[in-house]
């Protein structure tokens, strides 16, 4: 993506002191631009309040929307509502390369700041760890039937042979340790 085409870049050098509001609608093209994105589709409304001060900028993100994820239980896509907020501090300090989770150091020469990666990071962090349809009844019934009956289909008597071999190995090890 060309730098001038990035609508998620804020012009730091020309922002007036005080608060400036931005509204973004994050859509499919935003997620599609990222390799290996967990989210391929969705619509997320983002409100960004940028407060410019003498020595720093405070970026306050608030977002909510829906994204399409793959269900961990059945593998089908489903809509996941998300919401979140975050506060980031952009501080002027040319000598300091250390970054905290919520503090990013910039130089006086930085005239703009790209928000794309931060937006993606916060959306990704708002995703649930366990990603499933809200109700199991919405899952793909065919896949669930295969999962629930997998144990019945694979029971061919190997467990007994494995247990016998395992028990024999444990007995030999115990005898060896005792002697």
Image (cartoon, helix red, strand yellow):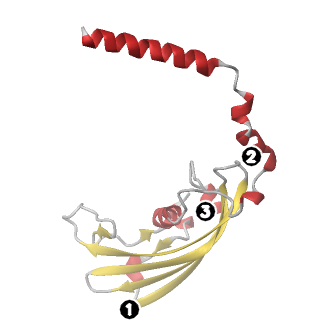
Q: Is residue 139 above or below residue 10?
A: above
Q: Which residue lies under the disc numbered 2?
A: 144
Distance in Å between CA atoms under marks 3 and 2: 33 Å
The quadrant of the image that shows the N terminus is bottom right
Q: Residue at x 34, y 80 (%)?
A: 57
Q: Which residue lies under the disc numbered 3?
A: 30
Secondary element at tag 2 = helix
Q: Residue at x 33, y 74 (%)?
A: 90
Q: Horizontal placement of 142 versus 7: left or right?
A: right
- Rate crowding at label 2 as few (under 14), some (14 to 19) or many (20 or more) other CA atoms within 10 Å: some
Q: Earlier in the sequence, mark 3 or mark 2?
A: 3
Q: From this viewpoint, is residue 25 visible?
A: no
Distance in Å between CA atoms under marks 2 and 1: 55 Å
Q: Which residue lies under the disc numbered 1?
A: 18
Numbered-mark total: 3
Q: Is residue 136 above or below residue 19?
A: above
The x, y position of residue 127, in whole percent, is 55, 62
User: Which residue in the rendered view is the most extreme toward the left?
Assistant: 95
Which quadrant of the structure image shows residue 142?
Answer: top right
Task: Depth check: give the residue in front, 17 or 120.
Answer: 120
The quadrant of the image that shows the C terminus is top left
The x, y position of residue 108, in whole percent, is 28, 73
Secondary element at tag 1 = strand
The x, y position of residue 122, in whole percent, is 48, 66
Q: Residue at x 57, y 53 (%)?
A: 37
């Amino acid at each position: 993506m060309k730098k001038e085409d990035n609508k998620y870049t804020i012009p730091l050098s020309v922002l007036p002191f005080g608060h400036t509001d931005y509204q973004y609608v994050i859509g499919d093209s935003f997620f599609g631009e990222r390799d290996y994105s967990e989210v391929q589709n969705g619509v997320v409304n983002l409100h960004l309040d940028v407060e410019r001060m003498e020595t720093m900028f405070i970026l306050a993100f608030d977002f909510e929307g829906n994204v399409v994820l793959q269900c961990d239980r059945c593998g089908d896509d489903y809509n996941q509502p998300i919401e979140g907020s975050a506060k980031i501090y952009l501080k002027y300090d040319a000598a300091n390369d250390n970054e905290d989770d919520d503090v990013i150091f910039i130089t006086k020469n930085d005239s703009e700041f790209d928000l794309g990666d931060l937006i993606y990071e916060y959306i990704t962090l708002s995703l649930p760890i366990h990603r499933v349809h809200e109700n199991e009844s919405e899952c793909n019934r065919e896949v669930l039937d295969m999962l629930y009956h997998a144990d019945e289909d694979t029971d061919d008597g190997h467990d007994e042979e494995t247990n016998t071999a395992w028990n024999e190995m444990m007995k030999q090890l115990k005898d060896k340790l005792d002697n």
